[in-house]
Image (tube, grey):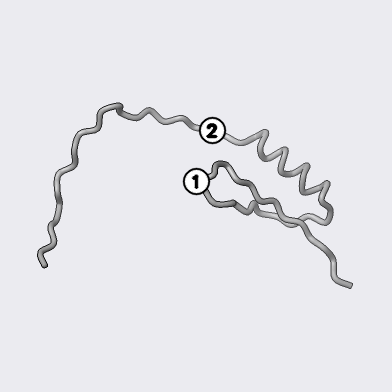
Amino acid sequence: MVKNLYVVWIKIDETLPWIELKGEYQTRIDARKVAKSILNTARIKIAKTRTKAKPMKVAATVNR
């Protein structure tokens, strides 16, 4: 008999693809519990960026 296994996929934003988390679970309830615990312990980092960026210098050019 073939067993159904469940995996957890998350999507953070519309611009990012779906991400499959490690692990396979025998029931949908177990998969949901693990997904909630992972999202509750997720670490988020907000990085500081410059509001005005300096233009980059050209490193190489291509001639046709």
Identify the residue under disc 1: 15
- Choose between 63 and 37: the one closer to the eye: 63
For disc 2, the neighbor class at 10 Å (few under 14, some 14 to 19, many from 20) is: few
- What kind of residue is marked 2? Ile
Q: Mark 2 sits on what residue? A: 44
Residue 46 shown left or right of residue 3 in the figure: left
Residue 29 position (above or below residue 44): below
Helix, strand or loop at mark 2: loop
Indicate the position of residue 53 as horizontal and vertical percent values: 24, 32
Q: Residue at x 70, y 55 (%)?
A: 23
Q: Nearer the viewer, mark 1 or mark 2?
A: 1
Quarter of the image that includes the N terminus: bottom right
Q: Where on the picture, by quarter, is residue 12? A: top right
Q: Earlier in the sequence, mark 1 or mark 2?
A: 1
The quarter holding residue 34 reads top right
Percent x, y for residue 4? 82, 63
Q: CA distance from mark 1 to mark 2?
A: 17 Å
**Which residue: 76% across, 56% down?**
6
Q: Residue furthest left?
A: 63
Taking the image as shown, residue 37 lies to the left or right of residue 48, namely: right
